[in-house]
Image (cartoon, helix red, strand yellow):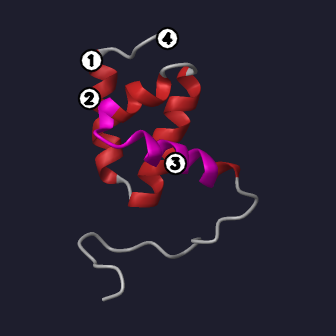
Amino acid sequence: MEQYSARVEQRMKRLFQSLSEKDRRRYAAVEADKLGYGGTDYIAALFGVDPKTIRQGLADLDAPTDPASGRIRKKGAAAGG
């Protein structure tokens, strides 16, 4: 598996931090998918997320419709609050 340069990793991390929770999950999933075998572990370590988060992102992307469309929580907002 090919790894990204340190410069590209820094840019990816900055982009990742600017995204909503749902978009982070999906972005990580796309990046892991591009890398193929070992990509999930590499991207999970790069972004500091659980590999299950990336697998959920892949499932989100494979779903025919997005059930959470339009429902993005604000940063710091508690669920069920």
The amino acid type, in three-letter code, at marker 4 is Met
Query: Which residue in the protein does label 1 denote?
Result: 6
State which mark lies toward you, 4 or 2.
Answer: 4
Mark 1, secondary structure of its residue: helix
Q: Is residue 36 magenta?
A: no
Residue count near mark 1 (Cα–Cα under 10 Å), binned few <14, some 14–19, many ≥20: few
Residue count near mark 2 (Cα–Cα under 10 Å), binned few <14, some 14–19, many ≥20: few
The amino acid type, in three-letter code, at marker 2 is Gln
| Residue 70 % position (x, y) | 55, 75
Give me the C-alpha separation between circle 4 and circle 2.
19 Å
Residue lying at 46% horizontally and 50% vertically, measured from the top left: 25
- Cβ–Cβ under 8 Å for marks 2 and 1: yes
Question: What is the number of the mark on residue 26?
Answer: 3
The residues colored magenta run 45-60
**Quick one: quadrant of the C terminus?**
bottom left
State which mark lies toward you, 3 or 2.
Answer: 3
Give me the C-alpha separation between circle 3 and circle 2.
18 Å
Residue count near mark 4 (Cα–Cα under 10 Å), binned few <14, some 14–19, many ≥20: few
| Residue 19 % position (x, y) | 37, 54
Left or right for 2, reference 49: right
| Residue 68 % position (x, y) | 57, 71
Q: Tell me: residue 1, above or below residue 14.
A: above
Q: Earlier in the sequence, mark 4 or mark 1?
A: 4
- Taking depth in this image into account, of 44 and 19 the one nearest to the observer is 44
Query: Which residue in the protein does label 2 denote?
Result: 10
Residue lying at 26% horizontally and 29% vertically, measured from the top left: 10
State which mark lies toward you, 1 or 3.
Answer: 3
Quadrant of res 49: top left
Mark 3, secondary structure of its residue: helix
Query: Which residue in the protein does label 4 denote?
Result: 1
The amino acid type, in three-letter code, at marker 1 is Ala
